Amino acid sequence: MQRTSGKIENRVLWSAVLLGMFLGFAVVPYEAKAQADYKRYYDEDNLPKVHEIFQRGRYDIVIQICDYALRRGQPSWEWRTLRFESLANVGRYEEAVEEAVETTDLFSDELGALLSAHGMFESMGLREEAEKIYNAINIAAGAVPEKDRTAQDYVYLGRAALVLGADPATVLEKFYGMAKTFKAKGQNIPEGLVEAYLAAGDLALMKDDFGQAGKEFQGAFKLAPTNPDVLFGLAQAFMPSDRQVAGTYLEKVIEEAPFHFGALLMLTESSIRRERYDVAKETLEKVESINSRHPVAAAYRAVLVELEWNDHVAFELEREKALSVWANNPEVDHLIGRVLSDKYRYEEGAERQLQALEMDPGFLPAKLQLALDYLRLGRVEEAWPLAEQVGKADEYNVLAYNLAILKEEIESFASIRSYDFIIRMPPNEAEIYGDRVLELLTEAKLVLGEKYGINIEERTLIEFYPKQQDFAIRTFGSLGGEGLLGVCFGSVVTMNSPGSTTAGKNNWEATLWHEYCHVITLTATNNKMPRWLSEGISVYEEIQRQPNWGQRMTPRYRKMILEEEALTPIGEMSQAFFNAKDGESVLFAYYQSMLVVEFIVEQYGLEALRSVLTDLADGVLINDAIARHTIPIDRLEEDFAISTLSLAQNYGPGVDWRVPEDDEVNPLITLSLASYLKKNPSSFWALQTLSGKLLDEENWGAAADCAEALIDLLPDFVGFGNGYAMKARALRESGDLVGEAETLERLAAQSDEALAAYHRLLEVEFEAESWSEVIANASRAKAINPFNQRLHYCRGCAHAALSESAAAVTSFEKALLLNPANPSEIRFRLADLLKDEDELAAKRHLLDALSDSPRYQQAHSLLLEIAGKDPQNKVDAEKEIIDPSSPEEL
């Protein structure tokens, strides 16, 4: 006896049931309609059911039903369109084309039939056949009486208008908009109403207007919440901005229609993006079980063999298979290139787009993707004309429009150039921190390049964006990316400016170092490295550059490791990023990636890590590359887990981490907290909670003591609620400014984002005239928010006091650019610094100071002092002092 799988048995059984139900229903006579046109009633009753079967991907069933209906001589053209669309979907393309041609001959006046055939011809590159029916479509569209039009008629007319080149906005208003005026009455939904929303949503997707697409599909969802095409439209609309929501809709599509090609192929791409290649292949098998010749499935197969096995021969075979249905199908190479670019392989992605454009020079999706690829490769001057061409050809394309706006924004940027770098940012920002960007990048290239044996000869492009939306369009090609500080593409880095919404929250210098490390490692591997390794090396190198950069063990991470089993096996590290359920999980993925890199370097040396990168460049898979230069991956995972568990266990070895139950202590009552702490003197929770409670009660002395005990218990902890910040506040309020400064300095040494501490230290040290400390804390603060005028002023004063005139001038000039409250004083200080080296500039600063503050006696005196060197200059100066608001050119 031959044995079959349960899946096949179930599928055959379901097919038989569906077909039997349909055929059984079809032959039952209708007594109430005995005198009517039975064939017409047959179509009206059964076509909706067959459409539903078609939507759910059971094309084999649809073909059988259509064959039966046509043998009966059923008159509706929909039997034929359903049949040829189903034939195409099961890979019987030649039969589908033959059926479509016959349909256009038999139903040359039926607009719906002509549109279905036209779509079939276009999808297979049969442009001659498509052009043959243009005139028929036009005539059929014009023949629909306006007074008798239904919602479905308006949808057909809209689709016809688009085929004939009508303006999309007109189509939305005159046709799809009119179709939407037909309203549902209870469960009675007019035919064509859902289709109107679907058509409008699809049109928005074509224009990359995902927001509008989402609105249209949500309108359809209210009417048909289980319609697979509606759910799939929502998945497409949300994918660029919210993959979690998109994934939920995608799951619902597959629940309703397990063989929905669009959903299965989207799931395939999502799996490839997440490096779940096994899932991607399983999903493709479902598509191929229905259509073994599906071009898009074969294109994804080509991507998989390239990414997973670096098998160029197999890649070409799969690509040829994808092109077997239509030899010049530009969609094949466009898709392959787009997915490769999504995996940071932009050179190969661009090559694919060029191949697609060679097949069809007017294929706009490839042209637009090529523009994005060129932008990410730093070939900016080649990118803009392509985006402009798309914008002219399709003025409603949202991405092309956004790129045009971005181009204008970038053209307004200042450029700072060196032999190694091109740095672009707004001119006002370039004057404030552009020099520091270049200084840090130059250091990073020297240090990291030497460390990893990489000499980058071409210039690296670095761009800073003050607007999140511009950063998103430049980086992702769409809005989104909130929370990301910077992105590296290889030779191009884009960053949110410290003047953007991230101002005062993150250390942009650490981010810049992190991103340039990506430049080094992506170059070393030809962009063939998993995200986790790239991020792990970058965080690791942050810490090597400055110990308080990067990430460290925290109480929360300790708990995640020891109590929540949050560690991911090294062989599956990519999933730590892809499956992260929230921001905290993402940050932990960064941290664990760093720990893995640190472990490899400490146990096997830096050379082992460098050798892994070399192997990746040669196409070796990550786990194989690691095993080659360390030990087998399963043993490495075991050793790493032991090491990391030990690290977590030894973090705060004397700390009592337990959080008490509600009946053990009342956190709102100080005496209750103190009593609990007395019994549990090593309780982290009790010390932290009691310190905060004592601050609230303004019991400064006790708060300082309690906070110091917290510091002694866990000196490495500088997160929210740390002992340093609480103790410093208590000391400040009690008047102990020296003790406050000492405590804040301990915090500043360990934290790279303690902006409030840096600012407070700046003021305390400024008052104490501790000039070296002023400069150090001004530098710390500038690494977070360089647009604080006060830090530049204090730094200028410190440099001046240390007789570092050039540095003082630079600091004061920056302070002057940031709208200081007293610009006259800064101009006076600049004049005093410049009087011996640049008398002309000194006089100009003094005259500007006097223009704002005519009674500024020190400025008067200094101007006369400068002028006193020459009697004539003294006379001129006295004249200018009389009317300092209108100085003549000197």
Image (cartoon, rainbow, N blue to C red):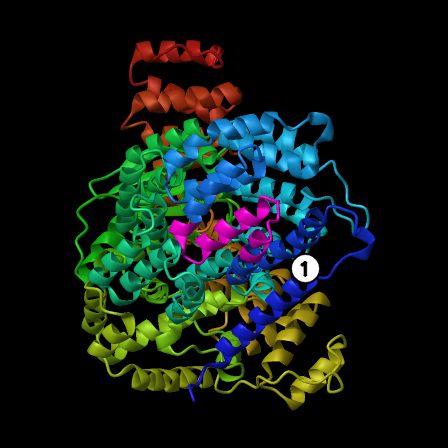
Work out whether 521 lies above or below 591. above
Q: Along the line of sight, which residue is nearer the eye, 870 or 883?
A: 883
Q: Using the rendered view, name the quadrant where residue 26 is placed.
A: bottom right
Give the residue furthest to the front.
35
- Quarter of the picture containing the C terminus is top left
- Quarter of the picture containing the N terminus is bottom left
Please state the horizontal and vertical placement of residue 543, each as a whole percent of the image. Answer: 35, 65
Q: Which residues are magenta?
A: 67-95
Q: Along the line of sight, which residue is nearer the eye, 377 or 352?
A: 352
Please state the horizontal and vertical placement of residue 652, each as a whole percent of the image. Answer: 48, 82
The answer to whether residue 772 of the structure is visible from this angle is no
Q: Along the line of sight, which residue is nearer the eye, 215 or 566?
A: 215
68 in the magenta segment: yes
- Please give left or right for residue 388 compared with residue 235 in the image: left
Work out whether 113 lies above or below 688. above
Q: Using the rendered view, name the quadrant where residue 232 is placed.
A: bottom right
Q: Secondary structure at mark 1?
A: helix
181 in the magenta segment: no
What is the chief secondary structure element of the magenta stretch?
helix
Q: Residues within 10 Å of mark 1 (few under 14, many from 20)?
A: some
Which residue is disc 1 drawn over?
26
Please state the horizontal and vertical placement of residue 587, each as a whole percent of the image. Answer: 47, 66
- Please give left or right for residue 179 compared with residue 338 in the image: right
Please state the horizontal and vertical placement of residue 79, each as a whole percent of the image. Answer: 57, 49
Q: Who's the residue at 17% across and 47% down the image?
A: 457
Q: Along the line of sight, which residue is nearer the eye, 644 or 255?
A: 255
Three-letter code, disc 1: Ala
Q: Who's the residue at 29% across and 81% down the image?
A: 633
The answer to whether residue 576 of the structure is visible from this angle is yes
Q: Who's the residue at 62% across and 47% down the image?
A: 217
- Please give left or right for residue 765 compared with residue 669 in the image: left
